[in-house]
Image (tube, grey):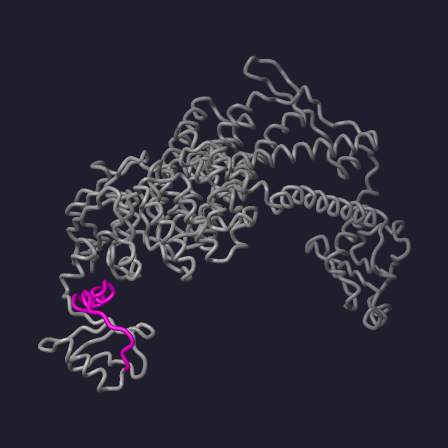
Amino acid sequence: MESKKYWIVAQFEFKEIVRKPSFWLATLFLPLLIGVISFITGYANVEASKEFEKGNTQFENVYILDRAGVVDEQLLVEPYEKVESEEEVIESVRSESGKLLIVIPEDFESTYKYELIYKKDEKVLAGITMPMVINGLLKQSALTQIQDPLKIRLLTSDPSAIVKSFDDEGNLNEENFGQYIVPIASLVVFFLAVFISSSFLLQSVSAEKENRMIETMLSIIDKKSLMFGKMIGLMGVVLVQLLLWLALGLGTYVLVQNQFNLNLPIDIGSIDTSMVPINIFLILSAFVFFAAIMTGVGAIGTGAQDSKNLSSIFILLAIFPMYLMQILITNPSGSLSQFFTYFPFTSHMILLLRNSLGAISTPELILGLVITTVYGVISLWIALKLFELGCLMYNRRPSFREILQYFKIGA
Amino acid sequence: MAKYSIHIEDFSKSFGKLKAVNNLSFDVNEGEVFAFLGSNGSGKTTTIRCLLKIYQPDTGKLLINNKPYTEAFNKVLGYLPEERGLYRDAKVLDILVYTAQLRGLSKDIALKRSIKYLEQVDLIEHSQKKVSQLSSGMQQKVQLGTTLIHNPEILILDEPFKGLDPLNRQLFIEIFLERAKKGTTILYSTHVIDEAQKMADRLLIINKGERIEYGSTTEVRKKYGSDTLVVSFSGKRPLKDHKMYRSEITNSTAEIVPKEKYSTNEIIEELIKGGTQILDLKVDYPSLNQIFIDITKKHGK
């Protein structure tokens, strides 16, 4: 009977969210928004680099006073013009916008600095764009001194690496992008499942308390069933979102491929799925952990806004490793990574990352999985206690002392 | 219908240093309507919440049919909490069906009962509306529906008339009395005393968590004297505090309690002399309202 109650609560929570137009708007709008932003960013970068390659500037005249002799004169075509002294052009630069003077000093080799002088107005922002253009010009000038095409290529573009690694059986395998599909997808699912879903739960619990439905519910169903029912329902919501996004992604890919005859740049066969079961376990246990935290926070907050403010502390703790991602990736077994592997709020994500990159030993992984399970159980217990204590405290938050006292002796 | 009773014995509950309820004992008999009276903060809600294990009591026995409350009682028990509310974005019918299913009813039966209830309280045309689209009175009816949907045999109602207009208050009274006729045991807390006099078989008055009065409505009223004048009047209003009497006036009806040494005849003469025209007159026990006010004043709120 109790398990049936979970399902009734789960179904109701699921239906209540999924039938809201705001859910569909957010679900469909989010990938669209990401797509539009990515397109605009990509388009802008391509256009900017085209302009850069063309050497286009916002200036009609760019005067180069090269006292160090580092600029190849053959590269100076319109709008670039070599000048011999500052006095020649300084008056026109001072009085007219659209004219720029570059002064490369004699001691450029030691200072490694040049001056950029122009008349400022609302049409030009030379300080942001022009250093890139001039630096490009200086690099081009330096490259003209080198005759060897390979050296020129090495200095102008990065060669590609063919990465091969021995697996546990001693076989040498070539690594490719396909191997990163599962880790990337795992991280995306992790963020969606953990942060979006747990925020749904936060809203649900705090709204239930705010609109005073909680006492009615607690006279019908026990706290555990209510809490777990909500968690299951909201997990269903996230699953629907993920499936929709997957369908949208695949649909878009098929559409684009048919229209433009593009081939998938991924070797499907090279996708490593061996880490999937452990990643699923980590995502689920992270969901339980953060959902429990959000339930507790929702129960002790005075209302939706208060709970949201409180929850941001835990969200910040959870996403903190993102700021250290570069260090964690370059040294996945380092002491920083070790610390975050076992720290409650970060352990799930770091374990997921290290497991996906194959940068964790089996004993460490087992210990990590045990620890995340323990964290999950503890967080559920704490959440249940906070829920019991806070759910009937209307318009006030329990003090830290009250919480401790409750944990010791109950209500 | 099976009969249910409540037994509370030596129950105490504190919140920190605040003693919310102190050594309280009372019984609600099978099939009776029992009024639990007390001013705000007197300990009524705490007692009910402890009876239903929402809070844990410090000491004492709180039993339903000689057993502590368990989840199993939810099939036969309906609870209307004082702090009430509904899912604001959910549809009226969905909420009723949802709570009925949680009470163990099948989806079909839950749907039938919900529709029947909405018809009874004239809300059927609003069944597909969101709760937030309903007036406060309509929301109260839906809320009551979540309490009654499974035809409970024992009803625990915490301030059931709170925020109701006179029309809806009357509707609620009729619904409760109809249930009582069928044998439902009803315990309800209130500080609206008039309804208690109309509805309750027995009552308990508490103040600052302690029992002040307990017994049948008539017994309690008798205890406070039998010479109260209930006067319908026009003309000059009787004074609230006169050297011969004290009075409580509601519209054009005064409930007059003689002070010591003065008889009802002397008071009637004094009223007429003072310009009060007496339209109707009866000598009765003091009303529960008067008793409640006197007790609260005597013991301090």
Q: Indicate left or right for A371 with A126 as reference.
A: left
> Picture coordinates of residue B204 (x, y %)?
21, 54
Q: Indicate left or right for A102 with B249 as reference.
A: right
> Picture coordinates of residue B117 (x, y %)?
46, 44
Decide whether residue A88 is among the magenta residues. Answer: no
- Residue at 40% across / 52% down in the picture? B84
Decide whether residue B284 is among the magenta residues. Answer: yes
Quadrant placement of the N terminus of chain A: top left
Q: Is residue B52 above or below residue A58?
A: above
Asked whether residue A86 is in view, the answer is yes
Image mark count:
0
Please tell me which residue lies in front, B19 or A280.
B19
- Residue at 75% across / 52% down in the picture? A132
> Picture coordinates of residue A300 (x, y %)?
38, 50
Please tell me which residue lies in front, A292 or A365.
A292
Q: Indicate left or right for A235 with A218 as reference.
A: right
Residue ranking furthest to the left: B261
Range of the magenta residues?
A: B277-301
Q: Is residue A240 above or below residue B60?
A: above
Please tell me which residue lies in front, A377 or B147.
B147
> Picture coordinates of residue B250 (x, y %)?
31, 72
